[in-house]
Amino acid sequence: MPELQKLYDAVLNGDQKTAVAVTQEALAAGVSPMELITNYMVPAMDKVGSLFECEEYFVPELLLSARAMKGSLELLRPLLAASGAEPAGRVVIGTVKGDLHDIGKNLVASMLEGAGFEVTDLGADVPAEKFIAAIEEKKANVVALSALLTVTMPAMRTTIEALKQAGVREKVKVMVGGAPVTQQFAEEIGADGYSDNASAAVGLARKLVA
Amino acid sequence: MNLKLHPRAGERLADQLFHAGVEFPCGGESACGGCRIRVIEGDVPITEMMRVALTEEELAQGWRLACCANAAGAVTVEVDQWSVHVLTDEAAVPIEPREGFGAAIDLGTTTLVAQLVDLETGEVLGVETALNAQARFGADVMSRIQYELKQPGEPRAVIRRQLGEMLRRLAGGRALEEILIAGNTAMHHLFCGLSVEPLAAVPFLSPSLGEARFEAAELGWPGPAVFLACLGGFVGSDLLAGIVATRIDRHRHPHGLFDIGTNGEIVVGSREGIRCASTAAGPAFEGGRIGMGMRAGDGAIDSVHVNDGGFVCHVLGGAAPRGICGSGLVDAAAAALELSLVMPNGRLAQGAKTLPLSGSVALAQSDIRELQLAKGAMAAGLKMLGGEVRHLSLAGAFGNYIRQASARAIGLLPDDVVVEPVGNAALRGARMLLLAPHRREARLKGILALCSHVELAAEAEFQDIYAESMALRRYSLR
């Protein structure tokens, strides 16, 4: 039996090689993918999030942990799909049209994935139609919009308007974030939630789908 | 920054100035000259004490001492302590002599410099500096663009009027043959009255990056003006002029130009080709988003050394420390690394929450994080553009004041490259072009043909290089 605690440590320490190796061993030994995710990876990413919030971890550590987790998830994803296990929620995420910045968005996507959400990352400079198409295709219940520039923030508003026009606004909760975005702005444009960092975004998403 | 005051019964102007926050470094003894103010409107009579502390020329320009100032009517004064030190440039440059006078302008987001130049001799006859009056619409280019989108034309009117006043003071009734302006792409568009919409979203490609010419009558200026062409989305003619000043287009070996600021700019190249990029470094180097951050004015810690296992801080103006400016921040981080009070990953050692420097001034964990973001963006841009660079010119005020040893220790500047501060390269380049009316066109065409603009954030490897560059650790390009 492989030492599964090593998976927790590898994600926490951003050690992708070990994370992948332990996952392979565990699967070979017959451990279920859900057990790896629920008992080791989700707690590890939770810990990463709390270390980030108390300023012990910073962006580079977050990215490394996310990479370790992703390496492991790539092995598990096909098995999960085959088993038909339900994710914590289905999120469509992207940086809005006009904005190319995606580091913050990538962090949020990784943290959500680490928390057991099924995440569809549409990338950066995403037009509203792409969000709409992905919501319907993926049967998403959360849409996460990111913007780093004050000049691209209005695109969040127009994206939400487009969701209404297309008749999908009621199907999803909309969460927004990014350096210039504020709680007040989120309320103004009719978003359902705002978070000022990647770790708190997980708590927000959990609350929105609850 | 200007201050408008009305006389009040029984109160001296000096007291009003003091209450408005003007400091008297020598305690109001009129001995140090550190409380200089310049009268913009109204009258502040010259006292005997002022004659001792200030020169005839300064008095003629309207400079007075705040600590012994008085006035009978309303006055508007400029407070020297509150002004940003604006970098000008008077280096000798090659010249094609022609008759008359001209002007070179560095139109910065924060500061403005205009020089009156004798076109026959190349001599700089006068300099005017000021803070960009558009600052009231926002401190950075993005907020200015947003303002223009809401109130089209207002930023244009403000900057044209302000520069016109500076030019008229410089020209003193003379007509100017030509005025050359260098500035970033946003300043270019706002001045020329072009649509800023393309600058507000990806791919940041404006159809109107070219040189713009204006008749004197159109601007109400003492001569016709040329705003030099932009190089790309967020790389403007300030960098074009910088390339002229540092001769990157003439070098055989790759040479870099680094303008460290809120919007950091990087140019790397030689006569074979030039690549340029801009990177959103954030305001940390200007003291922004740093808890106790401030501009390099009185009371700012501007340098930090290690001595006897502790910090030795230098404070501008010799007073008690009130905050820390960009060069002090870089020094403090380097010193803290040396003392192992900060780890290379940016974490304060032993779970400390703050890093006390001097008096009440301390850095918080989040301040170090801001510095990591800012310096990581600059270093990542250089790594992506500049593998072959052996020589790096540092443009701008910050590049002039920063201590290289500290900048290398925290991994802002690379270890294996010769670094040289060049001062206000944009202004010097604009003056060089002003003084080369015949060769100018071919030179500019040549540079524009050599240059290509790189959108860093669009490159796949940017995220990893950026994250790796956030570490407070030395790096080499090769």
Image: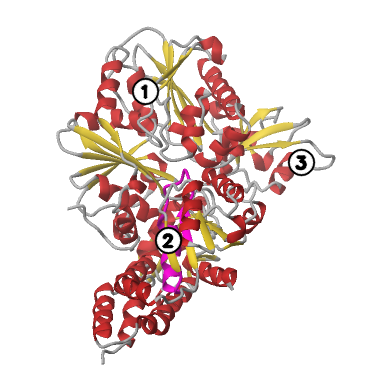
Question: Which residue ends up furthest to the right in the rendered image?
Answer: B9
Secondary element at tag 3: loop
**Chain identity of mark 1:** B
Mark 3: which amino acid? Arg
Q: Nearer the viewer, residue B162 or A33?
A: A33
Q: Is residue B391 above or below residue A142?
A: above
For image coordinates 71% across by 42% down, the residue present is B14
Q: Say few, some or many: other residues with alpha carbon within 10 Å of mark 3 (under 14 / 14 to 19 / 20 or more).
A: some
Residue tagged by mark 2? A120
Q: Earlier in the sequence, mark 3 or mark 1?
A: 3
For image coordinates 78% across by 36% down, the residue present is B6
Question: Which residue ends up furthest to the left in the rendered image?
Answer: B252
Give how far apart the Cα atoms at labels 2 and 3 are: 68 Å
Left or right of A125 in this view: B75: right
Mark 2: which amino acid? Thr
Q: Position of residue A66 (x, y in %)?
A: 36, 69
Q: Say few, some or many: other residues with alpha carbon within 10 Å of mark 1 (under 14 / 14 to 19 / 20 or more).
A: many
Q: Nearer the viewer, mark 1 or mark 2?
A: 2
Both marks 3 and 1 on one chain: yes
Residue B360 lies in the magenta-colored region = no
Give how far apart the Cα atoms at labels 3 and 1 are: 44 Å
Mark 1: which amino acid? Arg
Q: Is residue B340 visible?
A: no
Q: Position of residue A127 (x, y in %)?
A: 47, 46
Secondary element at tag 1: helix
Residue tagged by mark 1? B431
Residue tagged by mark 3? B12
